[in-house]
Image (cartoon, rainbow, N blue to C red):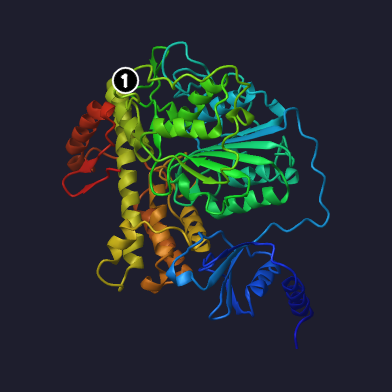
Amino acid sequence: MMHLASILSFLCVLAIAAGQCADTVRKAADCASHGYAQDTVTNKEACCALCASEKKCLQWTFHSFSKRCYRTSGSEVVRQGIFTMFSTCGIRAPAPSPSPTPSPPVGPGGRWAVIAAGSQGFFNYRHQADACHAYQIVRKSGIPAQNIILMMQDDVANSRENPLKGQLFNKPGDNVTDVYHGCKVDYRGKKVTAKLFLDVITGEESKVPAPGKVLKSGPNDKVFINFVDHGGVGIVAFPNGPLLHASELSMALRTMQKKNMFKELLFYMEACESGSMFPGLTANGRIFAVTASNAKESSWGYYCPSNDTVNGKHMGTCLGDLFSISWMEDSDLAKMSMESIAEQVKRVTKRTFKSHVSTFGDASFESEPIGNFEVARATRVARPLPVNPVNPVSPVNPVSTAGAVNIRDIPLHLAYTAWERAETEQQKQTAWNRLQSVIVAREADEQLFQTIVNRSCDSVGYGCDYSMTHSKHTIQDFECHQELAATLHESCPRRAHHDAGGWNAFNMKFSQTLVNLCESQTRLQKDLRDLEGIIRAACNDASKKHPTVAQDVSHQKLATAQEQTILELSVENKAHSSGKSLYIARGSSSCWGI
């Protein structure tokens, strides 16, 4: 006998099917190949209706030959080709709210900004400097303070490691601006999590801690979101708690659309592989995202040692990120221009010479002045972006490579620089211990992910290990990847006290490995639960081998590595102005060059 709930659901499907499907429909396409459910239905309209009747359904695919309707709860990439000619993809339209709550009145200007720095620790100085610089830009543009929400750990300006305590600088030189002065932080410390970020941008005032500040924008407002931190394929980090996954961000942006929280939304993201974070954006969704890199590469830090001198002091850290300082230094100049979003993206793309700036979503408003989002009214044309103030370059080479370091290598680069600059024997020993700790942690992460691959490929056959390690699959199975990424965060050892969990600045590059495993479950003959078990076991083994937080390592333990390591680091330090990536070799058996 059919349950009452099932009958009502069936009647609901019939009622919706009788009408016209309101979803975004793409013919000859598949966007639910890793669905949570599949059923036989009569046509694509019935498939659309079935998805509409299920709360967690976001996308569906109807295969006309088999009459099967696949539904997925995550945002999958739309695939088209010879094998999808007789399929129809649907991306669920936001459901109308039965009792819409009127949008609160917006502040002066009808513009809002949310800025988030997702890291902690002095070696991540650049993220908080980027965030405060962004705050200064949007504040000077005329956006009132009550319409700006800034979240960051706020542990850098007053860190004992900061040579200029109580200040933050986003570029080197003399008489440069202290971006921390007047930087109003709304959420700091342990409050800063991925959940807080999602609640803030979706306006969930009842779910956030004091001061309870959330985005209260309305349907006529322009919203600017800027996120700065570490990332990997499909993930970005926060200083506390779990990661933010691409599927969670996609759902939050859909919620903002459903709640009519903006007329146009501009999203700038600074993170490695940040081009993988916006799979669900559409060409007419009024959201335009610009990322520091594509989905397969690292982003780069900038103004790093030896180009880190402020007011005569070596800061011992990277002062900014290449993409971030490019758009912000452009905005500093463009505050008196009519530069459009498209023009800024073009200029920033040219200056971000180490990675591929990428754009996603609705480009219909990119011809609007960037001042509608970031900068003040125009009075004259923006000047060219400045050359590096410490190492000016010739007209033949208009962009300096000095001080650019691959994000994955920054902890190593900073540790070596500290050792090289140390003056006393005690300082030398302390810096040497830290350098060794970083090297050992990197090697431990290499071994951890190799173990995960080896165990996943057990009995599969020749070539599996290489494929899982080196392939660049695109995320299709978002649920699998999100689960594996969370498992690793919870189960694997932290390599440093500032890491929120098992992920860190170096090993987030291995998020791609998890993608490869998820997209190869049939070949591996292992399902999600099998892969989760492998990761947990490998993490437990790694925790027994290495301390939860990397400790100082004796000279004897790294005796075989010391000479080669110092040689390579010294060569790198001298050649760094040529923009070479950091290369660390251990003996003759392995390397960690990224």
Q: Where is residue 550 in the image (x, y as percent from the top left)?
A: 38, 43
Q: Where is residue 272 in the image (x, y as percent from the top left)?
A: 43, 43
The C terminus, quarter of image: top left
Of 169 and 34, nearer the camera is 34
Say left or right for 176 vs 355. Answer: right
User: Which structural element holds mark 1?
Assistant: loop
**Would you say residue 69 is visible in this rendering?**
yes
Residue 144 quadrant: top right
Of 576 and 124, nearer the camera is 576
Disc 1 marks which residue? 395
Identity of the amino acid at label 1? Pro
The N terminus, quarter of image: bottom right
Q: How crowded is mark 1: few (under 14 residues within 10 Å), some or many (20 or more)?
A: few
Say left or right for 401 vs 270. Answer: left
Say left or right for 213 vs 313. Answer: right
Q: Position of residue 168 (x, y in %)?
A: 50, 22
Say left or right for 144 vs 274. Answer: right
Report the number of numbered marks.
1
Extreme bottom residue here? Answer: 1
**Residue drawn where x is 37% and y is 41% of the image:** 408
**Residue drawn where x is 54% and y is 22% of the image:** 334
Q: Position of residue 542 (x, y in %)?
A: 37, 55
Of 270 and 13, nearer the camera is 13
Residue 385 quadrant: top left
**Would you say residue 125 is visible in this rendering?**
no
